[in-house]
Amino acid sequence: MKIATFNINNINRRLPNLLRWLRAAKPDIVCLQELKSTDADFPLREIDKAGYGAVWRGQKTWNGVAILARNKDPVLTRTELPGDRGDQEARYIEAAVGGIIVTSLYLPNGNPQPGPKFDYKLAWFRRLQLHAAKFVKQDIPVVLAGDYNVAPTELDIYPTRSWDKDALIQPKSRAAFKSLLAQGWCDAIGDTYPAKPMYTFWDYKRNRWPRDAGLRLDHLLLSPKLAPRLVKAGVDRKIRGEQGASDHAPAWIVLR
């Protein structure tokens, strides 16, 4: 079973890129973020024609998350992260596919920091930790996939001081990610490549893609029940170099 997470950065604008990648990579499950589409504008017809069922939660202009499954329909289990009824941002969706629970999450960016946006990021992280702990306690096979907007270690950002004040690499952001892992989650990409940069994001500005000035922001975390099934993991870097590409590349895992 091949599972991928991909911040598509506007699904309708990048639809040709997405469909080409689906045909080439043939993932069984795909977790998408930053749809930047309303529910009504989600390209269901084209996704269905490509052989994928889908569940999604859209939001006009910003955010939006979806889960696709090849030759089957994901069974929707949740469309929001619990813990804050007032939070209307489309950042979390959860579904059962092939005997496991899969999420597509888009954690808040948090910039500028300090400030209310960074406070929201940390509060969202706390809610995620509480929800994730239930999966671990119940011994459920889960993949927490998505764009976490955190580069967890120094290895996960190109050598630079230019991001030092950015929310993506702040000690509190990294500590929140580390606390999540401490529940027993396996960072599939990080654990597979403990000494090798595996960037998933290259900003459009300042020639960062040609310079390979990237960050690893997109993660697939496996619950203790599921982690022993990990076979391999990787990043489809070349997708970032295509015409009209998202600023992210798909990260993926293969499970027994």
Image (tube, rainbow, N blue to C red):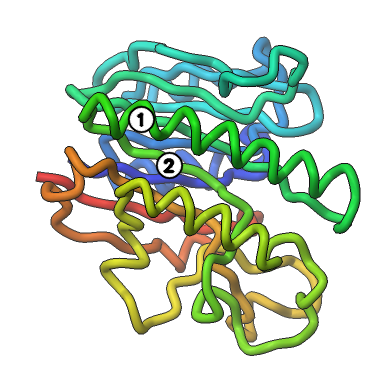
Q: Is residue 44 visible?
A: yes
Foreground residue among 39 and 166? 166
Q: Going 77% across and 50% down the picture, which residue do you hit?
A: 110
Of residues 207 and 147, the one nearer the viewer is: 147
Residue sitting at x 44%, y 22%? 94
From the image, tell me which residue sits under label 1: 102
- Image check: 181 left or right of 12? left
What element does badge 2 sit on? strand
The picture places residue 65, in percent across and down from the top left corner, at 57, 29
Give the position of the C terminus as an image quadrant.
top left
In the rendered view, does 203 fall on the left or right side of 80?
right
* Residue 81 vertical placement versus 151 (above, below): above
The answer to which of marks 2 and 1 sits earlier in the sequence is 1
The residue shown at (73%, 25%) is 89
Residue located beneath label 2 in the image? 145
Q: Secondary structure at mark 1?
A: strand
Other residues around mark 2 within 10 Å, as few (<14) / some (14–19) / many (≥20):
many
The spot of residue 140 in percent (x, y) is 23, 27
The amino acid type of the residue labelled 2 equals: Ala
* Residue sitting at x 35%, y 30%: 102
